[in-house]
Image (cartoon, rainbow, N blue to C red):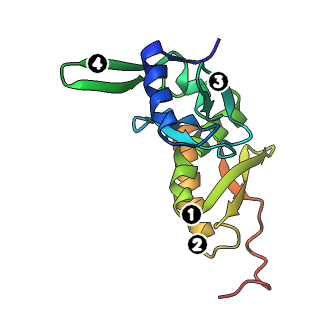
Amino acid sequence: MSAITFTESAQEYLADLLEKQNTPGIGIRVFITQPGTQYAETCIAYCKPHEQKSEDTALALKAFTAWLDAVSVPFLEDAVVDYATDRMGGQLTIKAPNAKVPMVNEDSPLPERINYYLQTEVNPGLAGHGGNVSLVDIDDEGVAILRFGGGCQGCGMVDMTLKDGVEKTLMERIPELKGVRDVTDHSNKENAYY
């Protein structure tokens, strides 16, 4: 059973749109921006062959494939895509009741909670700079060890980002966290260019 339901009318409408693209094998991709926050938006985009990501879930519908973004899948639980017609024409609607619901709580394991907030709050902010951060480990003192990648690697602002942004966000959300540390040692500056 898939997390998301496409009504018959939605499938027909989307199949019709896809046919007009004149791209064999084109499907759609469903994803949620900022899932689990009040800013969550459920989006449907065209997905040409090979545009899907390897971790996407394929949902085979009658006339096309819907690719579901891996991070978004839990938030698409009970979602319904419908196409409703009225006097004014028709409209595609997406109801995703769980898009804004955090999928972690105080009882979730610490790594799950850290990863959740990194995905939903920290990385969307860093993405604008081409950067991202991931959890490597949690040490015995309860400090999260993070790895900065992309545009953050070796950036002189990383200490500020780490302390003011990432650490503040994570410690507000997860009170038992003692701090964060960067596994990418930016203090080794002999190769750095200022």
Is disc 1 in contact with disc 2, using a CB cutoff of under 8 Å? Answer: yes
Secondary element at image label 4: strand
Disc 1 and disc 3: Cα gap in Å? 38 Å
Given this view, does label 3 or label 2 mark the residue nearer the observer?
Answer: 3
Classify mark 1: helix, strand or loop. helix
Contact between marks 4 and 3 (CB within 8 A): the answer is no
Q: Quadrant of residue 2?
A: top right
Kindly identify the residue that appears in the image at 24 percent across and 25 percent down.
89
Residue drawn at (62%, 68%) of the image? 158
Q: Amino acid at mark 3?
A: Leu
What's the CA distance linking mark 3 and mark 2? Answer: 41 Å
- Front one among 100 and 86: 86
Image quarter where the C terminus lies is bottom right
Q: Identify residue for label 2.
A: 157
| Badge 2 or badge 4: first in the primary sequence | 4
C-alpha separation, residue under disc 4 versus residue under disc 3? 25 Å
Q: Looking at the rendered structure, which numbered label has been put on residue 59? A: 3
Name which of mark 3 and mark 2 comes first in the sequence.
3
Q: Which residue is mark 4?
A: 85
